[in-house]
Amino acid sequence: MKIKLIKLVLDNFKGAKHFELNAEGKDIVVKGENNTGKTTIADAFYWLLFNKDSKGTTKFAIKTLDDAGEEINNLKHSVYAVLNIDGKEQHIKKTYSEKWTRKRGQAKASFTGHETVYELGSTEEELTPKKLKDFNEFINSIISDEQIFKLTTNPFWFNSLKQDERKKILMSLVDEVTDDDVINSDSKLIELKKLLGDGSLDDFKMRIARSKKAINEDLKAIPVRVDEINHNMPDVQKYDKGKLDNELSEINSEIKTIDEQIRDIENGLSVEKIEKDIKSKHLDIQYLIDNHNGDSRRKLTSLNNQESEQERAIAVKRRDLKNLTSEHRSNESEMEEQNNKFNNLGRMHRELVNEEKEFTTTTVCDCCGQDIPEHMQQEAIKKMQEKHNAEKSETLEKIQSDGIEIKDRVKYLSEQNNEIKESIEKIKVEIEQDTKLLNELKEEIKLLENNNTKVEDTDDYKQIDSQIQALKEQKEQSIQSINEDVESLVKSKKEPLLNKQQEIKQKLHDINVSKRALDRIKELESKQEQLAQEYNELEHATFLTEEFTKQKVNLMESSINDKFEITKFKLFNVLINEGVEDVCIAMHNGVPYDSGLNNAARINVGLDIINALSQHYNFYAPIMIDNAESVTKVHRTASQQIQLEVSKEDKELTVQVI
């Protein structure tokens, strides 16, 4: 799309009382002193299209001010443009004005806000007011993206964007450089393709970084581990493992011989026979117990069981009694609450039935201030009465319905409590009867227990018990004798051998620990060599990825820079450590845009960028070039140029076709 400015007319816009810019679609220069309205021209054009000034600000002063800096009221502020859009003329106008309204009864009109009128037409005579929605739809039909408009009309806009945004726009100008394109452009990168496999370069670089970090950590840790092993490794140079094994074998044999002697001492006495006699006597005691008062004991057991059953039955009935009592009390409480609700409903019913309400309505219209006719007032009151009566009838019906529901609930609870009372009385009688029966059982048990004799008081029991005590004393004496002999043998012969055995075992253990430590050191040294080799391979892979990135940089920068005439872009920065850093720096004759480039060169670089972007987006629109006086030779563009120059000689704005 190609847009050219034919004419731009400002009326009471900012400081311009009336100004006509007749460009006729050609490149022009607008000259004037500072504060004569050059920037106002750009602001007016942007405001007409986007409701913003040339800097993208929505809140800026449009109204004309007097010498005291106060707004001049009752002026219409308008911008009118004639555009040639792809060879077809289009007229656009926007007018911003104050709204003054005189209310009824007031002598003067008062300020009530602002209004904006939007007009479109194919000629000035055909300009027709449009709704904002329709106006915006038209603007969007010719300028679908405000960002693209700024990129193709403002020489400074592209380089004001963030680096990532600038780079994204540049990348869209050229076909994507694939990894295969880069690899095929340099034979030494063929090896990298094999390393990448089906994965991406970024994933591969992340894997390399993770692997190098892990290997570095392991390489740092290995010397520490070796030092730690050497520090903790016992000194076994003076030990002879073969000699120690022989000594341990001889000591084990001697200990075994002593253990056999101890078993002979323990097995040569009569402790086992005494224990058998004690067990036999205990069986005789048990026989006496089993056959003493047999019938009485069986009956006593039966009575004890009956007593337990009776106590459990009474406990269950008492629990049931407690639950029923609690339920009865809960029902009584709910009945009282429901009755209170019923009484409140009755009071509300009486108040509504006896209610007398008067209805009134306003007699003067809030909008126009005129009196409202009597019949309209009466009709309004009648509607209020009908609405009130309907709501009152509905409320009375609700009260009556709730009252019936409460009465039914109270009746149900009352009937339920009558049944609970009967159950409570029945359980109380049963508990009384069961308690009486329990007391009778206790008396019978007590009488039976008093009539029984204890088995321990019989002569037979006393005689056998005396024999058991005598056997236990005999057993203790025998055990004491055995312990003394065994203890003597252990202290004199076995303990010295055990101490010697432990000493040899410790030396053999130290030898094994030392051997495992030496094996571990060899293992760590072998791993160190392996890790060093792996790290070298990763370093080579890193070198290939960096070469890949540099080659891709060269290919991409070359493709992008071919799109521009006087501008070169630096998209990557090779660091001292041969790494690559993403940048996006516009340069002119080797000088970076943001550091060292003067304003004239910046304008020309901006125009060069506009040429490339206009061609890419196929969108050409008038370029407003502020401070154009700083450029001795303005870079040519395919789009129309409107150069705004500061000129001391021109006290008022002048327009000159280039």
Image (cartoon, helix red, strand yellow):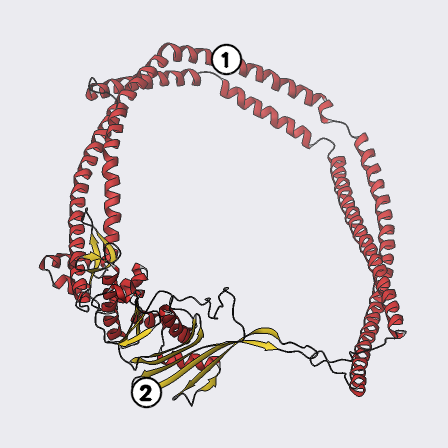
Query: Mark 1 is on which residue type?
Result: Gln
Q: Residues within 10 Å of mark 2 (few under 14, many from 20)?
A: few
Quadrant containing the C terminus is: bottom left
Foreground mark, 2 or 1, reads 2
Q: Residue at x 87, y 47 (%)?
A: 432
Residue 531 at least partly seen: yes
> In the depicted view, which residue is nearer to us: 111 or 410?
111
Work out whether mark 2 precedes mark 1 in sequence or the reverse, and give the earlier one: 2
| Residue nearest the observer in this picture, 357 or 308 | 357
Find residue 441 and report its horizontal and vertical position in percent: 82, 40
Residue 416 percent location from the top left of the image: 83, 62
Question: Where does residue 450 sit, x and y in percent of width and height?
Answer: 81, 30
Image: 246 above or below 531: above
Q: Is residue 450 left or right of residue 557?
A: right
Which residue is denoted by mark 2 in the rendering?
A: 88
Q: Is residue 229 left or right of residue 322?
A: left
The furthest residue to the left:
187
* Left or right: residue 318 compared with residue 226: right
Residue 124: percent from the left, percent from the top?
40, 87
User: As displayed, is residue 219 above or below residue 5?
Assistant: above
- The residue depicted at 38 percent of the width and 88 percent of the height is 122
User: Which residue type carries mark 2?
Assistant: Lys
Residue 499 badge: none
Mark 2–mark 1 Cα distance, whole angstroms, equals: 130 Å
- Residue tagged 1: 480
**SS state under label 2:** strand
In front: 225, or 264?
Answer: 225
